[in-house]
Image (tube, rainbow, N blue to C red):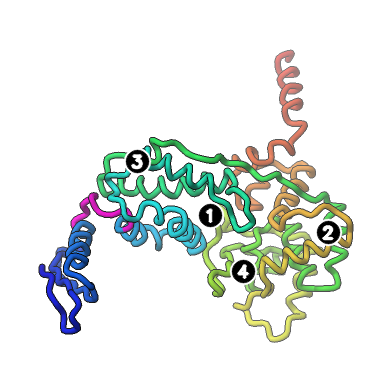
Amino acid sequence: MSVSKDPNGNWMVSVRHKDYTGKTKQTLKRGFKTKREGQEWEREFLSKENLKLDMLFSSFVEIYTVDIKNRVKLNTWQTKKHIIATKILPYFQDRKINEIRASDIIAWQNQMMRLRDKNGNKYSPTYLKTIHNQLSAIFNHAIKFYELQSNPAEKAGNMGREKNQEMLFWTKEEYLKFADSMMDKPISFYAFELLYWCGLRVGELLALTSKDFNFEKSTVRINKSYQRIEKEDIVTEPKTPKSNRTISMPDFLCEEIQEYINSIYKLKPTDRIFPISKHYLHNEMDRGSKEQNIKRIRVHDIRHSHVSLLIDMGFSAVAIADRVGHESIDITYRYAHLFPTKQSEIADRLDIERNI
């Protein structure tokens, strides 16, 4: 290894090291203004290569990025990347990862809780918890794979708290009123019909192509999800393995979607049948809710509305979970308040059983 002057008068570093296969490689880095800068870069490079955890936190984040980036969905990584870049690295990047203490985490938490968003509001408890969880995940990765001794973020304890957003939904009557307002735009009407009567996630809806439908069997196949990320159309696997499913459509919906697909000029089997955005759907919900004078819910709440309808129709949590791509325990937990008669029904049945 050596630090020397390059022909331009700057300093350069040449380092020989072994890669993960055991092969010897040479890395050359140019452009340092001083010899000291080159030596500091050399020390940090060798710390990463030899996995010594007296490296800078920012250097370990580079390792974490290589390890994790390709193992999570792109939109998940974009969220992680933003939090790391804006809420974590500015505070810890120049500290050695093995010297960060729980007291440092508490000081950072206090700083996070004082911050304001662009509208002058404090960050929500849910977002604060998300930020802390990401920092803790980095330390946990260092513990699990690189022998860091402890997690200072875990010692400090979390900040914020999980706060489930109020679950809103439309009744069937409210949805039908809303649908009346969508009939002037076929693409909007048929998109919301699939959302409401099949309980799709928005990404699942926007990824649909004509080849996902089997009109002979009246089914629609869910095997992908669409997001718009950094001005690119990204189609990925669905949210969870359970989300891969085939949904049976009611006859009226099957006829509607077949009519809609047949009306699209020069549609290819791989074309998205709803080439719109989530933002478009938001705007349409604003329009329809205002026109019909019904409460404004989120686009995702239409999925809750479908589940609510099925519960009201008497279907079990297992059957509903299969349809919407959840685990049955999640349906029981998240929608327990919509099963109002179950506890009394259980008590009544136990009363009968006791007296048999």
Q: Disc 1, disc 2: CB below 8 Å?
A: no
Task: Tell me the distance, in whole angstroms, between the alpha carbons under discs 3 and 1.
Answer: 29 Å
SS of the residue under disc 3 = loop
Amino acid type, label 2: Ser
Amino acid type, label 1: Thr
Q: Disc 3, disc 2: CB below 8 Å?
A: no
Residue interval drawn in magenta: 50-58
- The residue to which callout 1 is attached is 240
Quarter-wise, where is residue 14 in the image?
Answer: bottom left
Task: Tell me the distance, in whole angstroms, between the alpha carbons under discs 3 and 2.
Answer: 48 Å
Q: Position of residue 137 (x, y in %)?
A: 40, 48
* First-in-chain label (4 vs 1): 4
Task: Tell me the distance, in whole angstroms, between the alpha carbons under discs 2 and 4.
Answer: 25 Å
Disc 4: CA contacts within 10 A as few (<14), some (14-19) or many (>=20): many
SS of the residue under disc 1 = loop
- The residue to which callout 3 is attached is 151
Task: Tell me the distance, in whole angstroms, between the alpha carbons under discs 3 and 4.
Answer: 40 Å
Q: Position of residue 274 (x, y in %)?
A: 69, 72
Amino acid type, label 3: Asn
Q: Disc 4, disc 1: CB below 8 Å?
A: no
Q: Disc 2, disc 4: CB below 8 Å?
A: no
Q: Nearer the viewer, mark 1 or mark 2?
A: 2
**Does 290 appear above or below 12?**
above
Residue 289 is marked as 2
Q: Nearer the viewer, mark 2 or mark 4?
A: 2
- The residue to which callout 4 is attached is 207
Q: Nearer the viewer, mark 3 or mark 1?
A: 3
